[in-house]
Image: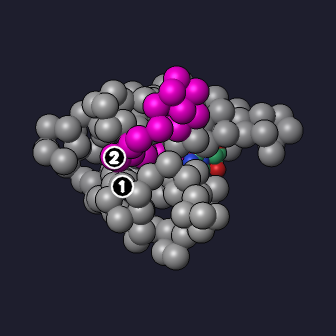
Amino acid sequence: MDQKLIETLIETATAQLAFSYVPYSHFHVGAALLAKNGEIYTGCNIENAGYTPSNCAERTAFFKAVSEGVREFSAICVVGGKDGVLTEFAPPCGVCRQVMMEFCDPETFEIVLATDTEHYQIFKLKEILPMGFGPGNLE
Ligand code: THU
C-alpha cells in the first residue's frame, strides 16, 4: 500500500469513531476496510443492552461489504480508544480475526493499527492469527 492510501484508511477509520454506539463500554472503535475493487467500507462498534449482540467495528465493515456482494479484500484499518481518544493500538478481537480468515488471504491481507497518520503499524493476518482455521480446511 502506498503512503497516501494508508493515510486515507487511517483518516476514514478515525472518522467512524463519531458513529460508535457505545453507551456501556464508552470504548469507540472505527474501521475502514479496503476491498480489492478499491472501495472502502466503513464500520463502527454497536453495543447492546443485552451485551452479547454487540458488534465490533471490523465486523460491521465486513458485513456491510459482503451484504453488497463484495467478498475480496486487501486491508483493514482499525482504531479505537476510551471515549474516542486514541492513545494506543486497538487490535482486533478473536472473533473479528476469524471473520477476516473467512474472506481474506492470511498471507497477504493487511491490518493497519494506528493512533494517527504518523503512528501506525501494519500486520499480516497470518501474524495476528497464526494457524487459523479457514474455508480451505473444509475442502
Ligand atoms: N471492539 C471492537 O469494535 N473491535 C474489536 O476488535 C475489539 C473490541 C469493541 C467491542 C465493544 O463495543 C468495545 O470495543 C469494548 O470491548
The quarter of the picture where residue 33 lies is: top left
Q: Position of residue 84 (x, y in %)?
A: 49, 38
The kind of residue tagged 2 is Ser
Q: Position of residue 63 (x, y in %)?
A: 58, 34
Residue for point 78% across, 39% down:
53
Q: State the residue position of label 1.
A: 109
Determine the residue located farthest toward the left in the rendered image.
Answer: 3
Front-lying residue, 109 or 83: 109
The quarter of the picture where residue 123 lies is: bottom left
Q: Spatial distance from mark 1 to mark 2, Cα to Cα?
A: 5 Å
Residue for point 58% across, 27% down:
67
In the rendered structure, the answer to whether residue 78 lies left or right of residue 50 reads left
Asked whether the residues under the numbered discs 1 and 2 touch, taking CB atoms below 8 Å apart as contact, a structural biologist would say yes
Badge 1 residue CB within 8 Å of ligand 1? no
Residue 13 visible in the current orientation: no
The kind of residue tagged 1 is Phe
Residue 138 visible in the current orientation: yes
Q: Position of residue 61 (x, y in %)?
A: 51, 34
Q: State the residue position of label 2.
A: 74
Determine the residue located farthest toward the front in the rendered image.
Answer: 139
Residue for point 55% across, 70% down:
132
In the rendered structure, the answer to whether residue 137 lies left or right of residue 128 reads right
Task: Write the start and end of the magenta stretch as one range.
Answer: 60-82
Q: Circle 1 — which element?
A: loop
In the rendered structure, the answer to whether residue 79 lies left or right of residue 50 reads left
**Circle 2: is it few (<14), some (14-19), or many (20+) Cα within 10 Å?**
some
Determine the residue located farthest toward the bottom in the rendered image.
Answer: 131
Residue for point 25% across, 53% down:
119
